[in-house]
Each structure stands twice: as structure tokens, then as C-alpha cells.
């Protein structure tokens, strides 16, 4: 498995404001990464104007992706994200993708109100398996991919383990050829323990069957610890077998 390891800019949300994406990217330059996922948590973040320096940095990486889940401060997820009345959102995502060299954009399938608006798009969109309360697991994805055969998948480990201990294996079994990216997100069961003392590795071994970038979303105890976290994840995925 290739060890293309990166972070989500969402790691910096407690340090920088939504409007300070430039500072997040500047901080990222000092990290031992060859991939990055840019989080546009809210539609207004799509207004960021990328500088030539930022574009140059992003083009130097092996993998760049966009994540557009679209939160609001008041109600959690907005319910108008992907509809005919808001096609400007997709227009802006596609424009940004082309400018920064993003290979894909992660969206949440339960925010799609008008499915046909995705059909004509050039961007490679990825659905994300979501937690059980959002009701987007392996079986729901099977149905979704019949409607959206052109869309691929990002495997979020924490969300999968929220369903069951076997959901990661199930997702890989069903969609191995469709999985474009792995996310290790906040709360990954066993992930923080893995980072701290090397425990609970077994649940991550199935991920070695995949050959795709790994994005760390889980926040370390401090940003100073982030380089060590990245290197530990990289070392794990470079080793074929774990005792």
C-alpha cells in the first residue's frame, strides 16, 4: 500500500477562524505530509481567494482533496447544500478544484436535494459513509451507488466503527474499487490509543488492503505533536504485517 499521508485543514479549526484558511495552509507547509484535504465547513469559506504561493504548495503535493460537509453554527448541517437553487456551490467547488489541482471532493449524500445536478459535473465527487444516526452505512451506500454510479467513496473509519466492528471490512469488501480516500477522524475508536501507545492496531489492518491516500482528521493533543502523529501513521501503513 502506498503511504500517501496527509491532514485535513479541519485540524486547525480551534486555532484559526474559518476566514483564515491561508494561515492553515501556511502551517501545513511545515508538516511531513504529501496530501491535504481542504475543509470548507461552510459555504462562505468557498469565497477564499487562493494566492499563487498557496496554489504552488498545493500543486507540490501528491494528493489534494476538498471536503464540503457544510455546517452551520445554529442547526448543524444546512439542508440546502446541493439543490438546483444553490448550483453556485458546485460551480465554485469545480472552479477551486481546477485551480488548486484537487482530485476529488467529499460530500455528504444526505444533503443532496436534487440528484440530477451532480450528473453533469466534471468533478469527481466522493460520498462518505456516515455515522449510524445519519443512516449512511454500507447497505445504504449500495443503493446510492445505483443512483450515482459515477460517484466514488471515502472510507471514514470512525463512522464505520460506529455501525459495528465489522463495518470497515464490509465497506472494503463491497466497494474496494470505489474507495478513493481513507479518513481517520476524531473519535476513531482505538485510533487515539494507537497514536499514544501503539495499541488497538488490529482494527486498522484491513485498511492496508487499499491503495489510496490517508487523511488524518483526528486532532492530536497539541499541534506540536502533529508531525510525530503523521510519521507514526506513515510508519504503520508502510509495514505489511503487524504483530
Image: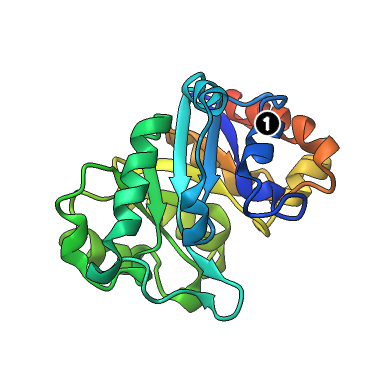
Q: Nearer the viewer, residue 146 or 119?
A: 119
Residue 166 makes an appearance in the image: no
Q: Is residue 117 left or right of residue 47?
A: left
- Residue pictured at 84% horizontal, 45% vertical: 222
Image height of 38 relative to 228, above or below = below
- Residue pictured at 52% horizontal, 45% vertical: 48
Q: Nearer the viewer, residue 135 or 111?
A: 111
Q: Is residue 124 left or right of residue 134?
A: left
- The quadrant in which residue 235 appears is top right
- Residue pictured at 67% horizontal, 43% vertical: 201
Q: Which residue is mark 1?
A: 26
- Residue pictured at 35% horizontal, 49% vertical: 92
Q: Nearer the viewer, residue 210 or 128?
A: 128
- Count of numbered circles on the image: 1
Image coords of residue 10 (percent x, y)? 63, 50
Residue 140 makes an appearance in the image: yes
Image coords of residue 15 (percent x, y)? 77, 50
Image coords of residue 141 (percent x, y)? 31, 63
Image coords of residue 213 (percent x, y)? 48, 33
Colour scheme: rainbow
Amino acid at each position: 500500500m502506498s503511504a500517501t499521508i496527509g491532514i485535513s485543514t479541519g485540524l486547525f479549526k480551534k486555532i484559526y477562524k474559518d476566514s483564515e484558511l491561508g494561515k492553515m495552509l501556511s502551517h501545513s507547509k511545515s508538516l511531513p505530509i504529501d496530501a491535504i484535504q481542504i475543509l470548507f465547513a461552510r459555504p462562505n469559506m468557498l469565497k477564499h481567494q487562493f494566492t499563487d504561493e498557496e496554489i504552488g504548495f498545493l500543486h507540490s503535493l501528491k494528493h489534494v482533496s476538498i471536503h464540503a460537509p457544510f455546517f452551520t453554527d445554529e442547526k448543524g448541517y444546512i439542508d440546502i447544500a446541493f439543490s438546483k437553487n444553490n448550483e453556485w456551490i458546485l460551480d465554485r467547488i469545480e472552479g477551486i478544484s481546477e485551480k488548486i489541482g484537487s482530485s476529488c471532493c467529499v460530500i455528504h449524500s444526505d444533503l443532496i436535494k436534487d440528484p440530477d445536478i451532480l450528473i453533469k459535473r466534471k468533478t469527481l465527487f466522493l460520498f462518505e459513509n456516515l455515522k449510524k444516526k445519519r443512516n449512511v452505512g454500507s447497505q445504504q451506500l449500495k443503493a446510492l451507488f445505483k443512483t450515482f454510479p459515477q460517484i466514488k467513496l471515502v472510507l471514514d473509519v470512525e463512522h464505520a466503527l460506529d455501525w459495528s466492528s465489522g463495518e470497515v471490512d464490509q465497506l472494503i469488501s463491497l466497494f474496494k474499487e470505489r474507495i478513493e480516500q481513507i479518513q481517520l477522524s476524531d473519535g476513531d475508536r482505538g485510533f487515539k490509543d494507537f497514536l499514544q501507545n501503539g495499541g488497538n492496531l488490529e482494527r486498522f489492518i484491513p485498511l492496508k488492503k487499499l491503495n489510496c491516500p490517508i487523511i488524518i482528521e483526528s486532532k492530536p493533543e497539541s499541534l506540536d505533536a502533529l508531525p510525530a502523529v503523521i510519521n507514526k501513521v506513515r510508519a504503520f501503513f508502510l509495514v505489511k504485517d503487524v504483530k
